[in-house]
Image (spheres, coloured by chain):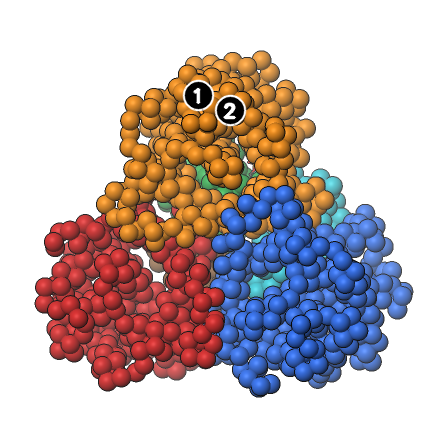
Chain colours: A red, B blue, C orange, D cyan, E brown, F green
Amino acid sequence: MDSSLVLQNLLSPPVLFFGLGLIAVLVRSDLEIPAPLPKLFSLYLLLAIGFKGGLELQHSGLDRQVLLTMGAAVTMSLVVPISSFAVLRRRLDPFNAAAVAAAYGSISAVTFITAETFLVTMGVSFDGFMVAALALMESPAIIVGLLLVRFSTHRQGARQGLSEGGLGLGSVFHEAFLNSSVFLLVGSLVIGYLVAAYNPAGLTKMEPFTEQLFYGALSFFLLDMGIVAAQRLQDLRAAGGFLIGFAIGAPLVHALVGFAVALLLHLPQGDALLFMVLCASASYIAVPAAMRMTVPEANPSLYITSALGITFPFNIVVGIPLYMVLVQRWIPVT
Amino acid sequence: MDSSLVLQNLLSPPVLFFGLGLIAVLVRSDLEIPAPLPKLFSLYLLLAIGFKGGLELQHSGLDRQVLLTMGAAVTMSLVVPISSFAVLRRRLDPFNAAAVAAAYGSISAVTFITAETFLVTMGVSFDGFMVAALALMESPAIIVGLLLVRFSTHRQGARQGLSEGGLGLGSVFHEAFLNSSVFLLVGSLVIGYLVAAYNPAGLTKMEPFTEQLFYGALSFFLLDMGIVAAQRLQDLRAAGGFLIGFAIGAPLVHALVGFAVALLLHLPQGDALLFMVLCASASYIAVPAAMRMTVPEANPSLYITSALGITFPFNIVVGIPLYMVLVQRWIPVT
Amino acid sequence: MDSSLVLQNLLSPPVLFFGLGLIAVLVRSDLEIPAPLPKLFSLYLLLAIGFKGGLELQHSGLDRQVLLTMGAAVTMSLVVPISSFAVLRRRLDPFNAAAVAAAYGSISAVTFITAETFLVTMGVSFDGFMVAALALMESPAIIVGLLLVRFSTHRQGARQGLSEGGLGLGSVFHEAFLNSSVFLLVGSLVIGYLVAAYNPAGLTKMEPFTEQLFYGALSFFLLDMGIVAAQRLQDLRAAGGFLIGFAIGAPLVHALVGFAVALLLHLPQGDALLFMVLCASASYIAVPAAMRMTVPEANPSLYITSALGITFPFNIVVGIPLYMVLVQRWIPVT
Amino acid sequence: MKRLDLIISERELDRVCEALNRAGAPGYSVMRHVTGRGPGGTVSEGMEFSGFGANAHVIVFCDEPVLDAIRAALQPLLSYFGGVGYVSDAQPL
Amino acid sequence: MKRLDLIISERELDRVCEALNRAGAPGYSVMRHVTGRGPGGTVSEGMEFSGFGANAHVIVFCDEPVLDAIRAALQPLLSYFGGVGYVSDAQPL
Amino acid sequence: MKRLDLIISERELDRVCEALNRAGAPGYSVMRHVTGRGPGGTVSEGMEFSGFGANAHVIVFCDEPVLDAIRAALQPLLSYFGGVGYVSDAQPL
Ligand SMILES: Nc1ncnc2c1ncn2[C@@H]1O[C@H](COP(=O)(O)O)[C@@H](O)[C@H]1O
Ligand SMILES: Nc1ncnc2c1ncn2[C@@H]1O[C@H](COP(=O)(O)O)[C@@H](O)[C@H]1O
Ligand SMILES: Nc1ncnc2c1ncn2[C@@H]1O[C@H](COP(=O)(O)O)[C@@H](O)[C@H]1O
Ligand code: NA
Ligand code: NA
Ligand code: NA
């Protein structure tokens, strides 16, 4: 049964197209999805996932269980970067360690979405409010990352000349909470909520766009993500053995911690898997963009390569079904 | 009941996403829909609205009522720019006055489309031939605008050197009637008509594309329009109080005139609203592009800011439901 | 009946939008579908056609008939460029003759897709494995084209300085079999096959994307193809009478040969039409890209203009229904 | 040899290219989607969907006499529609 | 007159344009979606969907004194964020 | 210091960048989607969907000796595939 889960995941269209993208780079095909087409799909996916999450949140309401899960999500996004930083400091300087740690404290929306479609195909239900957890976990690690840099270095130098440039805490908070991916996700979530509450006719009319198209659009986008991830993989040598190990070990460890929390909170199967995936995934969108601004001393190829080149494919291909094995063994069907 | 109409419009997905775009600029999020993605949606909307209008025109046929409405539409697109010019000349030079007047004599297809989806959600029917009125009202104001410049100035100067450049009346007519938005709209209308008449099987196969996707695509596009309109709003100071007043007063006045015409023509509720919206809306697509060529002396930030930054959001958010209140009070349900 | 077939094809949305694109250029409208939007549609069509072909291949299996058809397809893609070369050499130098010949030996996926939708509208069934024939016929002509150059010229010169550049046979095979359009088509075919075999739930979820959207997306893409083909037509004078004649005569002759082969193989109506269309169409995607690399001495405006500016519209507008007339007269309905 | 950099609105691109052809330019290169700020205000890509367009950057490498012909051909266009042009020295590689 | 070519990350484009404005640049032109290689590594458009962005190429034509003001305004930005700037001669058409 | 402007087909971009790397270029910047006209005819973006591609504009700032190495490395590529290259003077900001 376990291996069949992995196989079923491997043989789903999204994962197969992801693999096709990886192969395109390996065999040096000139297949590319030119910019800004991938942006179209990434905006679409955020909008759709937010909208659907919002309407489901409206249906389920905000009870104690929901609030506990949200609290646990935010806690994880504060704890993970700190513990990761401690591990990463063994080999990396504080700037790079903080940047990588922030990436792993945050989340990957595409991994989350792939896990959702995996659950749908499996016929396992999950709660819409998990999208709110996704949104809540995106930003805190950015702040933690910057604080780690502040406390572990006495950075001044080049910074001083930039006082007018507005690189104070204000602009960091701005970047963390109003960057386009968080903004669009949260905005669509609120819109989904409002429409579900006050204008249900609008839901049906959005459905062909946000629901029916979703699976195909995800497959198309993962084709591009496969290409991009494989291109990143070629930077692997720059990353070095330690970081490669971290990029595979971290999702496993964080998924396990997430699993323990899910057990504690008595999350049902679907929500437990999504929670584990949130903990296990690393950000290659919001965090790198923020780190470039706040920690330019860090080398982007380190944090992007590990999050996008290793951890992302690992979760998509192996991680999700693996975590599901654990979930199915220990959490009873409700 | 009145305020509930405004609310119902405000809480529809298209308007909410428009608002999200506005907010994105206000809070300085870096959300953007990079070019040419907005073009994709604008081409799609023109194609779909034209196609649907054509097939409905084929179903309804061209009777006396239709021809009268078309005539009234064209008349409005000749009268509005002339009367607007008279008002605008009080404060603006002839070049800017003519350019702004032309914008308000023409129409905004997106405002029209939003009004259509508003009617659909309200369950109020309307006739497909109104799309033909939309098409007919797009161009005449461009010609009127140029004639206003010719008659009120003795412009020669720089123009003379350009005799070969082909800026004669011919190229103005070309720009007015063959610009991409008029061309695609009319072309798709003719195609919809032909397919409905001779190849009805083709209609069913186009339906998922032109019908089902429409509402979501409009919402996505309005997200971008919100961003663009808000960016324009920041030019408001350049526009000045007079133009701001005009940009809010003109749609109200023109909608009222349109309402009177609709009463005269005994238009049913849906058609009356669409006619009012055509009169009330201002062009920020075909007209600015043409004005840049024919009246380069005019300052684009004046006519684009008023049409796109003020009148467009005003109609989308407040105007449409407001006009509907009037329609519902005075025109009986058929 | 015959003329009604032509008419029915002419009045289908894809062909009408293709015509609208042609007209846009003729009347000098500024309608354009800016890059990379056409690429989005071309990637989408390849992905969808491959995916659908793969799942149908899985349903039908690989029997003797399938293998025979595949063999015939590959044979045609070897024979056509050689015979075309012999004809073209009467007026063109070996470089240009080889490049044009290679284009006509390969296929046009969009022509194939248009023929498929024509069959669907006509209610004539066809086999999914024809997509595999499409894939198999794309590359061989590229190799043949290069060999024709090698054997008919003693090209060395400029080439020698490029030894490191890697322009050997290896890179030609790479270009032929791993160029993005072949790669995506074959990859999607394999994915469709795998999903149909092992994960049928995935099929349903892909359906709105790969099936329902298909017809509209094809229409939109053909609007762009009409524009591009008409722009190419303006290079016609450069092509000269001989090449214009070839560009119309070749599809007719190749379709006839394809028809004979289809009779021999006892292909049913739908498959016979598709086979003829594969033989009759010429490549303006994979082959020109490869020729630019392997035969830079050839003038792209010759091979692109003939394949894209003449043969492509000819097949879309006149050829497909014409070939169907032949098929209907001589091949019994099964 | 000379290098000419023109920055004009995309809307006038066709006219400018025709003028270059007529003036005998041996070739030119065009980059579209250029934004910027000049005496005529700020130009963004935000209105691209409307066909209003951003700027285009046109580069011409040519000899001095051709440059004079180009200057004469472009002067009325630039003064009517706006846009800027700058010249520097260049040598073939 | 001088021509300044700046190549910086798109992420810093707004800051750079503000600095140019403050330094008194008479105008500037921006090309986005620029890729390349520099001391800081290779920049591709592959991450464009993530908002990480490629480079932007900014061109400024200005007089020498303005250039000095621009140099002073940009120095801290270039040294903090990376990016390069080169100056050549130019004349109005 | 020197500034090199190359305009070549996008199809050959990878080869050109590799040649620049091998010749020791300290960096380069690439703008794609360039259209234009040259001795080889007109290049548009109309065929972009086909993978045929438009032109790319490559800029290299480097010292004179490196430029010589680049010239040697690019000569065969430009003569086989077409494309142009021009050199001007430049100074770091
Ligand atoms: N000094 C300058 N340096 C660089 N680009 C400029 C300069 N002045 C104007 N431009 C560009 O030329 C375009 C048109 O200028 P204008 O129409 O004169 O405002 C502007 O949008 C800028 O992109
Ligand atoms: N020597 C050079 N010539 C042309 N462009 C360069 C050069 N050096 C750097 N660049 C460009 O400047 C960008 C930023 O440089 P950096 O951050 O210093 O690596 C690079 O990605 C290149 O696009
Ligand atoms: N004199 C020129 N000035 C500017 N760009 C040129 C010039 N000549 C050629 N080009 C560019 O170089 C590209 C390739 O040139 P070619 O292959 O020699 O026709 C052309 O498509 C133009 O974009
Ligand atoms: Na995480
Ligand atoms: Na109006
Ligand atoms: Na063929």
For label 1, the residue is C262
Which of the numbered marks, if any, corresponds to residue C73?
none
Q: Residues within 10 Å of mark 2 (few under 14, many from 20)?
A: many
Identity, as a three-letter code, of the amino acid under mark 2 = Val
Image vertical order of residue B193 relative to residue A195, above or below: above
Q: Which is more foreground, mark 2 or mark 1?
A: 2
Q: Is A316 in front, or is F80?
A: A316
Judge by depth and name the residue closer to the eye, A34 or B49.
Answer: B49
Under 8 Å from ligand 6: the CB of mark 2?
A: no
With A132 as the anchor, is C18 left or right in this view? right
Q: Position of residue A25 (x, y in %)?
A: 31, 44
Question: Which disc, if any, is residue C327?
Answer: 2
Give the secondary structure at mark 2.
helix
The quarter in which the N terminus of chain A is drawn is bottom left
The percent coordinates of residue D36 (x first, y second) are: 59, 64
Report the chain holding disc 2.
C
Q: Which of the 4 image quadrants contains residue C267?
A: top left
Taking the spot 23% from the left edge, 45% from the top edge, the residue there is: C198
